[in-house]
Amino acid sequence: MTTTISTPAADAAPTPPPVILPEHSGYDEARRAWNLAADQRPAAIVQARSADDVVGAVTLAAEHGLQVAAQSTGHLAAALPDLDRTVLVRTMIAGVEVDPVARRARVGAGAIWQDVIDAVTPHGLAALSGSTHDVGVMGYVLGGGLSWLARSEGLAANHVHAIEVVTADGRLVRCDAEHEPDLFWALRGGAGNFGVVTAIEIELLAIREVIAGMTVWPAAQAREVLEAWTAWCRTAPESATTAFRLLRLPPLPEIPEPLRDTPIVVVDGAVRAGVHEHADGVLAAFRGIGTPIMDTWGPMSPAGLVQIHMDPPEPVPGIGDGILLEDLDEAALDAFLAAGEPEVVRPLLLAELRQLGGAVARVPAHAGARGALEGSFLLFAVGMPMAPADGEAIHHRVQELLGAMRPWATGTVYLNFAERGGSAESAFPAATYERLRDVRGAWDPGERFVGSHRITPR
Ligand SMILES: Cc1cc2nc3c(=O)[nH]c(=O)nc-3n(C[C@H](O)[C@H](O)[C@H](O)COP(=O)(O)OP(=O)(O)OC[C@H]3O[C@@H](n4cnc5c(N)ncnc54)[C@H](O)[C@@H]3O)c2cc1C
């Protein structure tokens, strides 16, 4: 369907931002998401550089009977539905202001984690970023935010002081624990279903050093390492947050030779240094296994935590999906490894288990809708389609692996790693989802907004 958008009269308020339509020469570049496999084709695109631009975009969409989808980087673009009746608002609102005394940062909706790290590190502060530098702060935090400090600090969504958001009626609303507390609660987990966030105030941590790194083994030692790591996870201190991966890195020159295009097993992560135990003692249980190819664990600035996971440094095509798992028994390890063979994960890039539990499993006081994550592990599998024909095989393999692990699934998902989109219902306990529906009914009953996962208003 073709949608025609006309620009409102010049004296209309607010001033409309520039709109990029399919027939404009810049459309293809503007619609490109970080995930290059997401072929999103919105009815129109607004590159919002201010809150006023967002107000203008929401107003314009309402005038034309269109929906609005907020997107910062497009890491989760594959989860969005068809956008042919939607204005895609790419948030490019710059700025990270740090208050070192209050240990807070006000982050514009265009910021990626590297922007925050660059701003807070000189103050001896750290933020609860994820495993990679160029994920957008907005989608990550509003979806939950699982960092390398998660088991000691909890999810990033529960370290938010205030949120500024443009709602369906075109108003810029600032919400926090005292002002519009229901909206503040719902945004922290319900993400793009309630409006376009223009800025967020996050809490920072006074951490100057962590122990972090990775140990790498040949894939032949996968069973031995997985057994030792899952056993260690059962009693691991909350100061440690780690991940296990079956991995086959692409044959690219920037990847160190021993790791390039060869099946490997990796355990990586971080220990919050000096909090509970000495990291060597914490990690000894699995670092001593077999004969590692590489072991890089050591002290580092928390600023380095966005590098240890070797995530792609720039946009790539990805087809992936994830589920939450309970503790893994022998049969589960068999299923996981069998589904990963032969040649480890081919045609996938990786199959990953992130360690949950600790503070991730507890709903803190004043939590948002995404207070905690159920289960012991997050399973995520992804492949990089280098040609259109690869897509089907990768999709099939991802679902095959997830299917093999369903007997150990919690039944809930973590939306930031649920790349197939659809309803958000399976992500929350029933009472939480019902409350999210009520808040959506109050703030966006007509579904002006399109999130990566839908919360149906009541
Ligand atoms: C390589 C890689 C590494 C990752 N590592 C981690 C990790 O360590 N921990 C973790 O928890 N997750 C991780 N993720 C998942 C990541 O957190 C999600 O993909 C997240 O949604 C990305 O946010 P974004 O803003 O960059 O993406 P986008 O695709 O731009 O946004 C995702 C969704 O967030 C919402 N949203 C974004 N901006 C706004 C806004 N301004 N207002 C309202 N809603 C908005 C929308 O619903 C949007 O569809 C990783 C993903 C990748 C691809």
Image (tube, grey):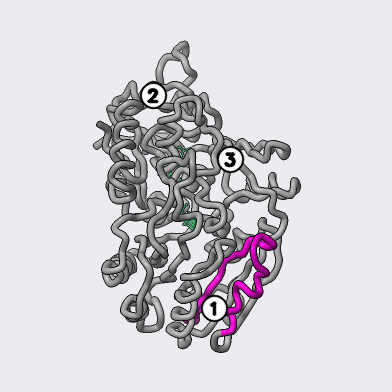
Q: Circle 2 sits in a helix, a strand or a loop, which is it?
A: helix
- Residue under pointer 1: 260
Image coordinates of residue 27 in percent, x first then y, are 43, 41
Does residue 292 lie above or below 373 as drawn?
below
> Would residue 277 be counted in the magenta stretch?
yes
Q: Nearer the viewer, residue 308 or 281?
A: 281
First-in-chain label (2 vs 3) = 2
Say few, some or many: other residues with alpha carbon within 10 Å of mark 1 (under 14 / 14 to 19 / 20 or more): some
Tell me the quarter of the picture where residue 1 sits: top left
Q: Quadrant of residue 132?
A: bottom right
| Residue 118 x %, y % | 69, 48
What segment carries the magenta color? Answer: 261-288
State yes or no: discs 2 and 1 in contact (Cβ < 8 Å): no
Tell me the kind of residue under disc 1.
Answer: Arg
Residue at 50% from the left image edge and 55% from the top image edge: 359
Q: Give the residue number, with chain letter if any, for mark 2.
A: 60
Question: Is residue 44 or residue 377 the one in the foreground?
Answer: 377
Mark pair 2, 1: CA separation: 49 Å
Can I make out residue 258 in this image? yes
Residue 402 part of the magenta-drawn span: no
Mark 3 surroundings: few (<14), some (14-19) or many (≥20) residues within 10 A: many
In the rendered view, would you say 227 is above or below 392? below
Q: What amino acid type should be assigned to the residue bearing mark 3?
A: Ile
Q: Secondary structure at mark 3?
A: strand
Residue beneath disc 3: 202
